[in-house]
């Protein structure tokens, strides 16, 4: 089976009558724990998936950005050509807004992309809460930085932290999705066989060995096939609620509220904001606890922290859905050490920390229970910690 990079290069040659100058790719991600903490200046703990989005590109000299993607049926989807100097937030819309947004941000940051033909192919499931949009943005950023002679593998490369901020701006300001910095940071900076502990406020990070197989475990991703969109109101409402709570508490971000201060803080804000604050404060504490348990190989305790995270997201942050709850409940009932929804919520995927020997039984139970309840049968993926974004060839 061809890789996304090979597919992108082949489609580029067919579309543009010759090979691309290069192919860049970026992965989707799973967030082990630390949900909705990134835009509250807290900590997150993602790792990259083997599933990737590839962008084949060649520079132009007329200032135009052309974007084409390969559909699931193999046919090209041509979004058109756009003058980079005339791009404005919201236009183009749809999937083309993500690469266009990256070009717009780079120009805002003082770069002058000369134009580029881009062709996209990938296997990160869209709408599954696995950061397909961030993978597209990050791969596009690497491609366009090459056109201004600032390749990320060169001596004049911008720091990956900066590239993450630029691609996050593309999603926030151009596309209009109020996400935090987690997804882009994970896609750019994760390493194979590791999870990335990342403190959003300080920028400090730590690559933590994440070898579930040595413990006879694996992370099973359950894509419920319930599609979500971060640009819809629910996500933004919660972010605004967190910002309002921080303002009322006199802190710059909820990260500054510790667990010892939580009861006092909850008594100082209106009741509707209390569950949001309780989730963010306790979730940030769970990220730190997970780091400690991983360093000590305490997998059972890691599983318990994952499950506690899901309950908080379900009951306090209220971003779960019946399918996510069902996936978590079935996995736990059938022997998973822990399970939780992952991603922004309102659909998407759950993850479960499962004994390898029990995976077939857990899979059967998931399929049977979803079918029995009249739900769409989920798609199951094995989450193997993989490498971050980079140039594939030539």
Image (cartoon, rainbow, N blue to C red):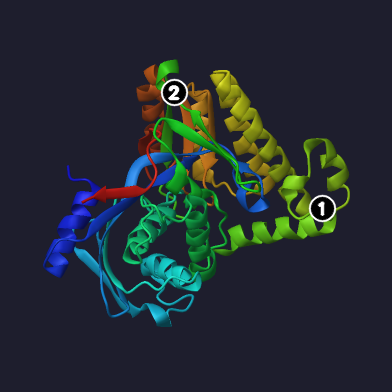
Q: Which residue appears at 50% of the width and 73% of the height?
A: 108
The reply to whether callout 1 and callout 2 are in contact (CB within 8 Å) is no
Q: Position of residue 319 (x, y in %)?
A: 59, 49
Q: Is residue 232 above or below residue 200?
A: below
Q: Which residue appears at 50% of the width and 61% of the height?
A: 166
Q: CA distance from mark 1 to mark 2?
A: 40 Å
Q: Which residue is mark 1?
A: 271
Q: Residues within 10 Å of mark 2 (few under 14, many from 20)?
A: some
Q: Which residue appears at 57% of the width and 54% of the height?
A: 180
State whether residue 66 appears in this view. Answer: no
Q: Is residue 26 left or right of residue 117?
A: right
Report helix, strand or loop for mark 2: loop
Q: Is residue 46 above or below residue 133?
A: above
| Front-lying residue, 44 or 245 | 44
Q: Which residue is mark 2?
A: 212
Q: Position of residue 231 (x, y in %)?
A: 52, 64
Q: Which residue appears at 33% of the width and 43% of the height?
A: 51
Report helix, strand or loop for mark 1: helix
| Residue furthest front in the image | 155
Q: Is residue 24 left or right of residue 128?
A: left
Q: Position of residue 193 (x, y in %)?
A: 41, 30
- Mark closer to the observer (1, 2): 2
| Front-lying residue, 147 or 57 | 147
Q: Position of residue 207 (x, y in %)?
A: 50, 33
Sequence order check: which comes first, mark 1 or mark 2? Answer: 2
Q: Quadrant of the N terminus?
A: top left
State whether residue 147 appears in this view. Answer: yes
Query: Where residue 89 is drawn, which disc sits there?
Result: none
Q: Is residue 265 above or below residue 168?
A: above
Quadrant hosting residue 383: top left
| Front-lying residue, 297 or 301 | 297
């Amino acid at each position: 089976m061809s890789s996304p990079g090979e597919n992108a290069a082949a489609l580029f040659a067919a579309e543009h009558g010759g090979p691309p100058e290069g192919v860049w790719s970026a992965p989707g991600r799973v967030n082990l724990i630390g949900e909705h903490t990134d835009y509250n200046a807290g900590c997150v703990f993602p790792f990259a998936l083997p599933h990737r989005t590839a962008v084949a590109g060649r520079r132009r000299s007329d200032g135009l950005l052309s974007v084409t993607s390969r559909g699931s049926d193999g046919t090209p989807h041509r979004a058109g050509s756009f003058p980079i100097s005339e791009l404005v937030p919201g236009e183009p819309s749809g999937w083309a807004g993500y690469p266009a947004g990256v070009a717009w941000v780079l120009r805002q940051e003082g770069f002058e992309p000369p134009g580029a033909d881009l062709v996209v192919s990938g296997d990160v499931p869209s709408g599954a809460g696995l950061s397909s949009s961030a993978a597209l943005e990050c791969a596009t950023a690497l491609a366009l930085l090459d056109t201004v002679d600032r390749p990320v593998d060169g001596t004049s490369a911008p720091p990956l932290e900066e590239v993450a901020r630029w691609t996050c701006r593309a999603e926030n300001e151009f596309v209009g999705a109020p996400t935090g910095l987690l997804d882009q940071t994970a896609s750019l900076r994760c390493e194979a066989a590791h999870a990335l502990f990342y403190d959003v406020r300080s920028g400090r990070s730590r690559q933590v060995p994440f070898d579930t197989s040595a413990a006879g475990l694996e992370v099973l991703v359950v894509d419920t096939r319930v599609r979500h969109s971060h640009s819809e109101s629910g996500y933004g409402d919660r972010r605004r609620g967190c910002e309002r709570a921080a303002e009322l508490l006199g802190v710059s971000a909820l990260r500054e509220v510790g667990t010892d201060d939580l009861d006092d803080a909850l008594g100082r804000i209106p009741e509707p904001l209390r569950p949001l604050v309780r989730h963010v404060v306790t979730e940030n504490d769970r990220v730190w606890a997970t780091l400690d348990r991983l360093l000590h190989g305490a997998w059972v305790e890691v599983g318990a922290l994952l499950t506690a995270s899901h309950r908080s997201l379900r009951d306090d942050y209220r971003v779960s859905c019946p399918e996510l709850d069902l996936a978590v409940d079935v996995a736990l009932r059938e022997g998973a050490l822990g399970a939780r929804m992952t991603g922004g919520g309102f659909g998407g995927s759950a993850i479960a920390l499962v004994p390898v020997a029990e995976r077939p039984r857990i899979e059967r139970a998931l399929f049977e229970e979803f079918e029995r309840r009249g739900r769409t049968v989920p798609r199951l993926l094995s989450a193997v910690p993989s490498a971050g974004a980079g140039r594939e060839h030539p």
